[in-house]
Amino acid sequence: MQRKRLWIILVTVALVAITLVTTFQFNRQNRELNENKAALRASYESLDSMHTLYEDRIQEIEALNGQSEELYRAKVQLESELDQIAEILYLLDGRQLPMREGQSLTMEGEEQDPESKYSPEQRKDMIDNALSSLKYKLVESQKRLKGYEQLLVVKDEEISKLKTVNEGLLVENQELKTKQNDMEANFKSLNQEKEKISEKLELAQKLRAKSIVVEGLNKRDKVYENPFRLRQLDFLRATIVLDINEVANVQGHQVYFRLIDGDGQLIMDPDGTSGEFKVKDELMVYSLHQEILFDNTGQTISFLLPNKEIFEKGEYKAEFYIDDYSIGTVPFRVR
């Protein structure tokens, strides 16, 4: 009987200890989760306020007969950022969160409560996936916010100039009418000069790569420099560092990565995200693609291509394009 009581006491103590450890870990994870959710929610609110400012600026520019396409494209990208952050918060909280006016996270015909749609195991997997991207999304949203703020400063300056121009036009309207004949005589010359300036400005505004590095990674994230051994090459990583360009606008750009084998054939993304783009009216196919907001801070762009038996021994080259022009090519060899 004494031995039986001793075993009962030992089992009870072990169960209590396990319960205390589990409770402590749960409380610690719960605190971390709440802190990260609060930080991400604050980023969402900042971006949402920026979205409202963008809408106001677009209305002002259009009222002044200015060009609002660039600001509109950035607004659309900002809306995409808001929806992505809201989706993460939606998965973490397990309930419908406030969205921008006219927007909803749930699709037509879906349940509002995700617990009624997914099993507990599916729900856990969804939250685990959302948590894995939470810190990354926090950093990215702060970077994007800076870019959006810089673009807003640029557009505020343009609005101020447009207002000044419009006010001046009202005052000088009568004087301009008397000088119309002289202006028509110089119109052709001015247009030609404007075209030359526009061409020079367009060339100067093109983004350039400060450096491009192609590296091999294994499954343990060990980095290998060119040339790579085939058995070391579980992933191919290409990293671009953009150069500072003081005349380039803060705006969105499309970045394309093309991987070419020794026979000149394009290697597609094994995950099926390859697509088409144009370079000087020539249709080309890319291996990987990213959309970025250029913020003139010397930002870094990375592409990661899994091997999945697409590499063989031989010569390769990695080509990089922004929008419709090339920014560099890097050859490498797999041994």
Image (tube, rainbow, N blue to C red):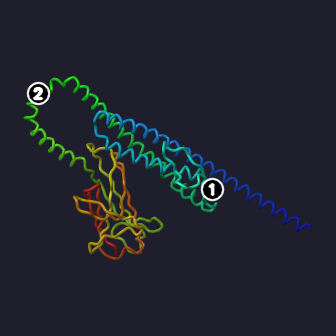
At x 53%, y 52%, the residue is 106
Q: Is residue 120 above or below residue 231?
A: above
Which residue type does callout 2 highlight? Lys
- The residue most toward the front is 109
Residue 208 visible = yes
- How far from the left and from the top, in percent, is residue 144? 41, 46
**On-image quarter of the C terminus:** bottom left
Q: Which of the 4 image quadrants contains residue 196?
A: top left
Q: Which residue is mark 1?
A: 115
Horizontal arrangement in the rendering, residue 44 relative to residue 210 (left or right): right
Q: 216 or 264, which is in the foreground?
A: 264
- For mark 2, give the secondary structure: loop
> Where in the figure is residue 71, as x and y percent of width and height?
34, 42
134 or 5: nearer the viewer: 134
Checking the image for residue 1, the label placed there is none
State yes or no: discs 1 and 2 in contact (Cβ < 8 Å): no
Query: What number of labels is visible?
Result: 2
In this view, 276 is above or below 151: below
Q: Marks 1 and 2, how far apart in space?
A: 73 Å
SS label for mark 1: helix
Residue occupied by mark 2? 179
| Location of residue 206 in the rendering, given as x and y in whole percent from the top left corner | 25, 50
- Note whether 35 is above or below 254 in the view shown: above
Question: Percent x, y for residue 309?
Answer: 40, 75
For the point 19% across and 44% down, the residue is 198
Which quadrant, please, contains the N terminus?
bottom right
Q: Is residue 59 left or right of residue 279?
A: right
